[in-house]
Amino acid sequence: MKQSFATLAALMVASPAFAASGPFFSLWNSNFAVLIAFILFIGVLVYFKVPSLLGGMLDKRAEGIKSELDEARALREEAQTLLASYERKHKEVQEQADRIVAHAKSEAASAAEQAKKDLELSIQRRLQAAEDQIASAEASAVRDVRNKAINVAIAAAKEVVAKSMSAANNKALIEDSIRQVDAKLH
């Protein structure tokens, strides 16, 4: 109520109606009529409690904005928490990936070292097999040469013996051989 009187007093003091000529409190004075209409309008607004309704609406709007701000803050905090969680998970995944890469590198290095050792062993086995084949071929060649030499020697000895032996020597040699075989068998 005090607010409406203060408003009415301020309106009357600042009114340009005081600058008009003639009696101010006359219905023929348009400024006075406008003042009366304005006061009635303000009275109707106060009677129907429009200022309190406007204040309530503004309060509701302020509360809605405040709740939206609180919700936005809560969402922001939740988003920050979620972001921190994802950053932590990303860091853990990155560390795990680094460990996997390091493990893979060490396994690759050990596999390469093992492959190198296996290759060296394979080369040694192949060299040994080649040396064995060479030795075998060499022994076979020596045997073949020896057999040829023996055959040639036997053939040469046969010719020499055949040329140097007579029929009588041949018969005596055969009889001597038969006696030796007979003595050994009995």
Image: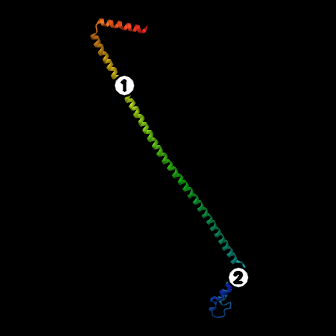
The quadrant holding residue 123 is: top left
Q: Nearest the camera: 64 or 22? A: 64
Q: Residue at x 43, y 37 (%)?
A: 121
Q: Amino acid at mark 2?
A: Gly
Residue under pointer 1: 140
Q: Amino acid at mark 1?
A: Ser
Tell me: residue 91, above or below residue 51: above
Which is more N-terminal, label 2 or label 1?
A: 2
Q: Nearest the camera: 34 or 84? A: 84
Tell me: residue 95, above or below residue 3: above
- Furthest toward the bottom, the residue is 22
x and y, in percent, of residue 84 in the image: 58, 60
- Label 1 or label 2, whichever lies nearer to me, is 1
Mark 1, other Cα within 10 Å: few <14 / some 14–19 / many ≥20: few
Residue under pointer 2: 43
x and y, in percent, of residue 135 in the image: 37, 29
Q: Residue at x 34, y 7 (%)?
A: 174
The disc placed on residue 122 is none
- Side of 169 where 7 appears, left or right: right
x and y, in percent, of residue 166 in the image: 28, 7
Split into 4 quadrants, where in the image is the N terminus? bottom right
Tell me: residue 184, above or below residue 107: above
* Residue 37 in view (yes/no): no
Q: Nearest the camera: 156 or 96? A: 156
Q: Nearest the camera: 130 or 158? A: 158
Label 2: which secondary element: helix
- Side of 95 where 10 appears, left or right: right
